[in-house]
Image (cartoon, rainbow, N blue to C red):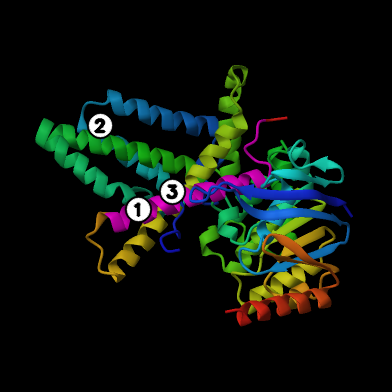
Amino acid sequence: MATISFRHASVAVAVDSRPEPKTLLADVTLELTEQRIGVIGANGSGKSTLLRLVNGLVQPTSGTVTVDGADTVRAVRAVRRQVGFVFTDPLSQLVMPTGREDVELSLRRSVRNGTERRRLAEAALDRFGLLGLADQSIYELSGGERQLMALAAVLAVDPSVLVLDEPSTLLDLRNRELLRRTLSGLGQQIIMSTHDLDLALEMDRVLVVEGGRVVFDGGPAAAVETYRALCAAGLAAP
Amino acid sequence: MRGHGFLLANYVPGNSVIHRAPLALKFLLVVGCGLASFLVVDWLVSAAVLAVMSGLFLLTGAGPRRLLAAVRPLLAVLLVIGLFQWWQLGGPTAARIVLNILVCVVAASLLTATTPMQRLLDGVVSLATPFRRFGADPERFALTIGVMLRSIPYIAGAFADVRDSARARGLERNPRALVLPVFITTVAYARQTGEALAARGLGEAED
């Protein structure tokens, strides 16, 4: 597994209406080496920011984030070759009109030969049982099929780390289950934010993020309990 | 989101003679039709060329519905152009201009309906390769075209959604209620697409 290191990583953004920058994530120091890492927390707590740091989509305003020693700012291309990213809404992620074209797009940089690219794309789609849907418009696919298509496009280039930002939020129960089974069969190191606490309980390690800070880091059962307690305290507050 | 079911330039699998024709020949046909639209001065010739191009299209097996789908989004614009030209320059000129535009659209559809997107992008990369010496990145050319083909139906769908929302609130006659949300949705979509491409390491300068 890759070693993902956060060293005092903070992210702050300027907000027009405020004199001081708004802190999205504050002073995170972590070393992630487990295969399945969950990130849970309320909306706006900083989960997405934490995940985006791993792929270099967000750069730390202070501190560093590295993936196997590669800095996500200075060596962002190397990091992105190693770290695949799956967004919540697959329609934001699938940039080509059909699944086949999108998977082939992923492969364009690494595979110059068109025939070989087609073969690899078909293999990637077949792996998820999507070959029959390869030439359909992405708008004609169900939410689950789209999410699997987005996953296939990311995995086609065989990243060693897969970051997923709430991949099941827009899915119904059946598609959520389909995604869960698919993810459990992957060999990649997975870092995933989720509101699905059952899914979080299947992780090896879970981080609880609250107000831009990692307030708990440990086993899934204790993490879920902590998160529930935080939510209950939030509801109880006036 | 509604209105996204159609795809601009979607490929129709097949094994017709046009499917098997070299990509360069199909590119030349499109360019030739574009140039001819400036040179042809008789609307009857334009009509004959349109008939030939439509015949070629139907020869691909893509079917008249696909042909109609390519032309339908333009009909309102063509009507406005045709009426304006009729008023300004007379019937034959108006007919020639409208028919020449249709010839170009059918020729472009012939290319896209018979060529898989990736082969089309490979062709664009080959065409753009000579410009590499001037600092151009051919892969970015191809990516830009691919993203454009995906984005136009998205924006059309966003407009349909916004129009429905405005209608539900009784604001269908308010231009602000129509234009502003489409604009915001389009900007958000552009940001998301940029982010999705960046996350996959696409669109960056070549190593």
- At x 76%, y 62%, the residue is A214
Contact, mark 2 vs mark 1 (Cβ under 8 Å): no
> What amino acid is found at the position of numbered circle 1 in the picture?
Leu
Element assignment for label 1:
helix
> Is residue B200 covered in magenta?
yes
A188 up-or-down from B38: above or below: below
Give the distance between the C-alpha atoms of the residues marked 2 and 1, in whole angstroms.
44 Å
Using residue B159 as the reference point, say whether residue A118 is left or right of it: right
Circle 1 Cα neighbour tier, 10 Å, few/some/many (<14 / 14–19 / ≥20) = few
Circle 3 Cα neighbour tier, 10 Å, few/some/many (<14 / 14–19 / ≥20) = some
> Is residue B190 covered in magenta?
yes
Circle 2 Cα neighbour tier, 10 Å, few/some/many (<14 / 14–19 / ≥20) = some
B25 up-or-down from A178: above or below: above
Q: Which of marks 2 and 1 is nearer the N terminus?
A: 2
- At x 25%, y 63%, the residue is B172
Give the distance between the C-alpha atoms of the residues marked 1 and 3, in whole angstroms.
17 Å
Looking at the rendered image, the disc whose residue lies closer to the viewer, 2 or 3, is 3
Number of the label disc, if any, that sits on residue B180: 1
- At x 84%, y 51%, the residue is A4
Q: Which of marks 2 and 3 is nearer the N terminus?
A: 2
Number of the label disc, if any, that sits on residue B45: 2
Contact, mark 2 vs mark 3 (Cβ under 8 Å): no
Q: Which residue carries the number 3 mark?
A: B152
Using residue A114 as the reference point, say whether residue B42 is left or right of it: left
- At x 30%, y 71%, the residue is B168
Element assignment for label 2:
helix
Bounds of the magenta span? B176-205
